[in-house]
Structure formats: structure tokens, C-alpha cells
Image: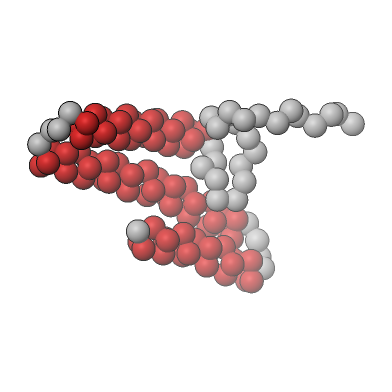
Amino acid sequence: MDPPAPATTDPGASAPAAHGSASGPRTRRALLGRLRRIEGQVRGIARMVDGDADCIEILTQVAAVTHALEAAALMLVDQHLRDCLQRGAATTLADEQTKQVEQALRAVERLLRT
């Protein structure tokens, strides 16, 4: 029997896809890229506030970050729906299919509540 793989703290490291995760290396890389850009935008907004920039300019950047976060959230919802629907389709148990659809709907509801 092989020893277990060492634990990693690298958030970008490949790990087995867990339910609800940003599974797939392509999705993970794309999402991390978006989040890093958003992080840079937020730091830029902080510099603008610190530099006493015009309020309208700051609000414009806040709106851009909000839109970017919504796009990242939609990417996650898309992946989650695909995963849930694949798991539901892979089973012939109606209860499991219903459970997967309900989980997907809850994910969408959480996004819409924000």
C-alpha cells in the first residue's frame, strides 16, 4: 500500500475535485487569474482613497470590481451546475438526481441574494 500524499497548503495546487470545488485545472487557473486581477484592482482602489482621488473615479473602480466578482461567481456557479448535473445524470436513483438539482438551485439562490 502506498503512503498517503503529503498535505499541501498551496491554494493553486491540484487536488482531487471535491463536491462544489472549482474542479478542473482550467477552471481553477481561470478563476485564480480573475481573483488575482480583482485583488490588484482592490489595492488600486485603496491607493486611490489614500491619495484622495475623486469620489466618482473611486466609485467607477468599485463598480468594476463588483462586476468582476460577479463574473467570477458566475464561473463558479457554471462549474457547480455542470458538476451537479453530471452527478445526477450518472445515477438512476431519482432521490440522488433530485438532491443534485436542489444543491445546484441553492448555489444559484446564494449568488442571487448577494
- Residue 19 is left or right of residue 28, and the answer is right
In percent of width and height, residue 6 lies at 74, 28
Q: Nearer the viewer, residue 38 or 44?
A: 44
- Residue 51 is left or right of residue 73, and the answer is left
- The residue located at (43%, 52%) in the rendering is 77
On the question of residue 60 being in view, the answer is: no
Q: Nearer the viewer, residue 20 or 6?
A: 6
- The residue located at (49%, 52%) in the rendering is 80
In percent of width and height, residue 71 lies at 32, 45
In percent of width and height, residue 53 lies at 13, 33
- The residue located at (44%, 47%) in the rendering is 76
In percent of width and height, residue 89 lies at 58, 59
On the question of residue 2 being in view, the answer is: yes
In the image, residue 100 sits, relative to residue 32, either above or below, namely: below
- Residue 43 is left or right of residue 86, and the answer is left
Please count the marks in the image: 0
Q: Nearer the viewer, residue 88 or 41?
A: 41
Q: Residue 41 occupies which quadrant of the picture?
A: top left
Q: Nearer the viewer, residue 114 or 81?
A: 114
Quadrant of the snapshot with the C terminus: bottom left
Quadrant of the snapshot with the N terminus: top right
- The residue located at (48%, 64%) in the rendering is 106
In the image, residue 51 sits, relative to residue 91, either above or below, namely: above
Q: How is the image coloured?
A: secondary structure
